[in-house]
């Protein structure tokens, strides 16, 4: 929003979440559990996630249950089994450690039980700051919004992300960028949320290239995780639309990796929407150039990300089917199946985004 648009009406309501940010702060998980008055928590973390050992140690006697089976898109039967274990073990809270999949599993349990969540994110997915949940069954991903699933406390410890492999780092950073764009063009936006989203774009576009030469650079890692915090906050205040709907349909149908799918699709959805968003296009110009769609596509390629939907495993038939299912999705430009099929076609063929395609 430029200075000439300060007369735009808006509503702003702060959402309650406690955020603890800083290298090494995973050691404070026990204190945060105590602050919430919890004494019997379940730790949800897949075995490979860094920091699991520390959390077990610092949680000590508060740790009543451990769950280490985590999967993308949260299979419903997995959520049901984990929920049953939480009930059988009599836990009074959930601590999730990991990316959006671990957070998502905690959310699926919280949806049914109302158990409070302390989230310790290790990727840039941003789920820890949203009231959005998703579960998958029979190749269909169901998403919804419920305040019960929004974590009460989020502990960001950038040290946990230092070992995130390049193949996950870039796509996850693009997942955060997708949240920024969704917030910037949302009709539910407000000036504060737009400021957060634009600053997150600025930080990702500087921090991500820095990691190319030194993936363990803690300052750049901290930048990306701070950007993920801003992006998740922005998304949690606005909501999703066409971009996320395409990714969820493809993810549910083909079990495509969520972050990689966002990275491939985002430049093309930005190209579709840019003509309708001169304000955010101008706002992002210092970071992405005058054509933000192309700027994102080039950033992805420079950062070693795949820009091809075919390479992820989707086909023209999938694109046709998804295009037919997204009509009516919230989006600044009315969604027509033909336009979506065209943009998916460009991503299948690994072509750069084309404005007004
Ligand atoms: P993920 O959680 O599935 O993690 C991907 C892989 O990275 C896993 O193998 C995991 O073990 C590994 N990993 C995670 N952190 C690591 C680290 N620091 N070092 C090394 N390995 C690490 O991936 P994701 O992209 O974070 O999450 C995707 C899921 O989150 C999808 O199901 C998506 O729908 C969901 N999501 C939900 C929201 C929301 O608001 N509800 C937002 C974003 C994503």
Image (cartoon, rainbow, N blue to C red):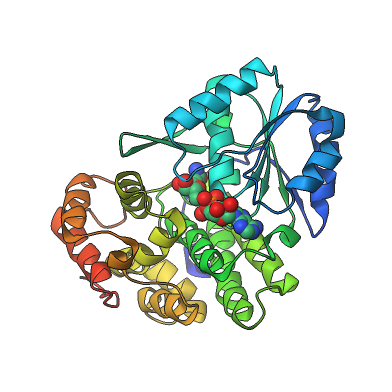
Percent coordinates x, y for residue 294 in the rendering: 36, 78
Give the left or right position of residue 260, taking residue 208 as reference. Answer: left
Determine the residue located farthest toward the left in the rendered image: 338
Above or below, 163 against 317 in this view is below
Give the left or right position of residue 201, taking residue 315 as reference. Answer: right
Name the foreground residue: 315 vs 1. Answer: 315
Percent coordinates x, y for residue 154 in the rendering: 70, 44
Q: Which residue does the image show at 67% across and 65% down from the upper left?
A: 163
Above or below, 79 against 222 in this view is above
Give the left or right position of residue 308, taking residue 210 as reference. Answer: left
Above or below, 60 against 240 in this view is above
Counting the numbered discs, the total is 0
Percent coordinates x, y for residue 213 in the rendering: 63, 83
Give the quadrant of the C terminus.
bottom left
Q: Quadrant of residue 289?
A: bottom left
Q: Quadrant of residue 211?
A: bottom right
Q: Which residue does the image show at 57% across and 62% down from the upper left?
A: 195
Q: Quadrant of residue 15?
A: top right
Name the foreground residue: 94 vs 138. Answer: 138
Asked whether residue 229 is in view, the answer is no
Asked whether residue 124 is in view, the answer is yes
Q: Which residue does the image show at 65% across and 42% down from the upper left?
A: 45
Percent coordinates x, y for residue 242 in the rendering: 32, 52
């Amino acid at each position: 929003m430029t200075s000439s648009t300060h007369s735009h009406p808006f509503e702003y309501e702060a959402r309650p979440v406690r955020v603890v940010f800083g290298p090494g702060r995973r050691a404070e998980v026990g204190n945060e559990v105590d602050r919430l008055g919890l004494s019997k928590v379940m730790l949800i973390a897949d075995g490979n996630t860094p920091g699991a050992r520390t959390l077990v140690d610092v949680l000590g006697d508060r740790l009543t249950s451990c769950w280490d089976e985590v999967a993308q898109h949260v299979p419903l039967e997995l959520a049901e089994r984990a929920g049953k274990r939480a009930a059988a073990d009599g836990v009074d809270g959930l601590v999730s450690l990991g990316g959006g999949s671990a957070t998502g599993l905690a959310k699926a349990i919280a949806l049914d039980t109302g158990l409070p969540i302390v989230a310790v994110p290790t990727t840039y997915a941003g789920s820890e700051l949203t009231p959005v949940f998703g579960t998958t069954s029979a190749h269909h991903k169901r998403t919804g919004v419920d305040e019960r699933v929004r974590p009460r406390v989020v502990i960001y410890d950038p040290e946990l992300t230092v070992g995130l492999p390049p193949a996950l780092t870039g796509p996850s950073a693009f997942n955060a960028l997708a949240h920024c764009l969704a917030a910037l063009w949302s009709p539910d936006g407000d000036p504060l949320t737009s400021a957060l989203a634009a600053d997150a774009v600025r930080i990702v576009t500087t921090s991500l290239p820095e990691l190319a030469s030194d993936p363990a650079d803690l300052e750049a890692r901290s930048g990306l995780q701070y950007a993920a915090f801003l992006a998740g906050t922005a998304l949690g205040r606005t909501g999703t639309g066409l971009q996320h709907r395409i990714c969820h349909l493809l993810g549910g149908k083909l079990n495509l990796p969520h972050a990689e799918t966002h990275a491939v699709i985002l430049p093309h959805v930005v190209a579709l929407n840019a003509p309708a968003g001169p304000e955010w296009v101008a706002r992002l110009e210092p970071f992405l150039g005058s054509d933000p769609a192309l700027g994102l596509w080039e950033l992805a390629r420079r950062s070693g990300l795949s820009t091809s939907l075919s390479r992820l495993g989707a086909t023209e038939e999938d694109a046709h089917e998804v295009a037919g299912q997204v009509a009516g999705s919230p989006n600044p430009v009315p969604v027509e199946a033909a336009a979506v099929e065209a943009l998916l076609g460009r991503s299948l063929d690994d072509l750069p985004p084309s404005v007004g395609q």
